[in-house]
Amino acid sequence: MKSRFVIALVIPVLLIAGCQRDDAKEPLAISGKLFNFNYRVATATYVLTLRRQAALPEESFVETMFENPAGGEPLMTREKIFPFWEKVSLQSPPVHCVVKNRPYHVAIRIVSTDGTLIQALDTTVTSTLDQTVLPAKPLVVGPFYDRNPEVFETGAKPDYRPEVGCKV
């Protein structure tokens, strides 16, 4: 009687365990993505965060291709991923001409030192704002965030006009 009871408990547990996926998790997953508009220095950048899900080789890199909102060649970055990082933050160089509600393509490749592809991720980033929220020139300059004399001329009204030349 006891053996039937044990079997009745063990078999469902084994069946459930057998339904688990055998393939390993991908090493990284996208956990956040946005456009960062910094009005003080008049820049917009892509920012993405990747969360560690599984082990990576000791020497690995993340190569990211960001669609260029102004047109032209994509913007590329390559950064080392350190083994102790639980999260990987990706930031593009400054971009121009971001359009509200338009999805921009981002391709992420995780590679080893010899260039072997470990993982590839594709996503889009959509902004809820467009480039017109930024002034054409930085409001501050230097390490102490001094007022930019080109924007705040003595005796003149500050120039907060947005960048020109974008089709927004």
Image: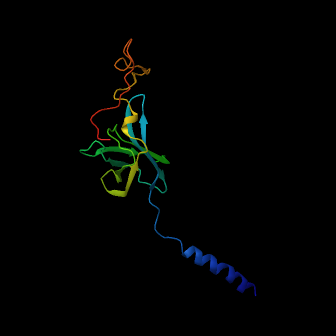
Residue in view at x 46 percent, y 68 percent = 23
User: Observer-nearest residue: 21 or 165?
Assistant: 165
Residue farthest along the bottom direction in this orientation:
1
Image quadrant occupied by the N terminus:
bottom right
Residue farthest along the left direction in this orientation:
72
Q: Is residue 154 above or below residue 6?
A: above
Return the x and y of residue 167 as percentages of the image width and height: 29, 41
Q: How is the image coloured?
A: rainbow
Q: Is residue 27 above or below residue 18?
A: above
Residue in view at x 34 percent, y 48 percent = 64
Q: Is residue 18 above or below residue 123?
A: below
Return the x and y of residue 24 as percentages of the image width and height: 46, 64
Q: Is residue 148 above or below residue 131?
A: above
Return the x and y of residue 51 as percentages of the image width and height: 48, 51
Residue farthest along the right direction in this orientation:
1
Residue farthest along the top direction in this orientation:
155
Image quadrant occupied by the C terminus:
top left
User: Observer-nearest residue: 96 or 164?
Assistant: 164
Q: How many marks?
A: 0
Return the x and y of residue 116 as percentages of the image width and height: 31, 56
Residue in view at x 63 percent, y 79 percent = 12
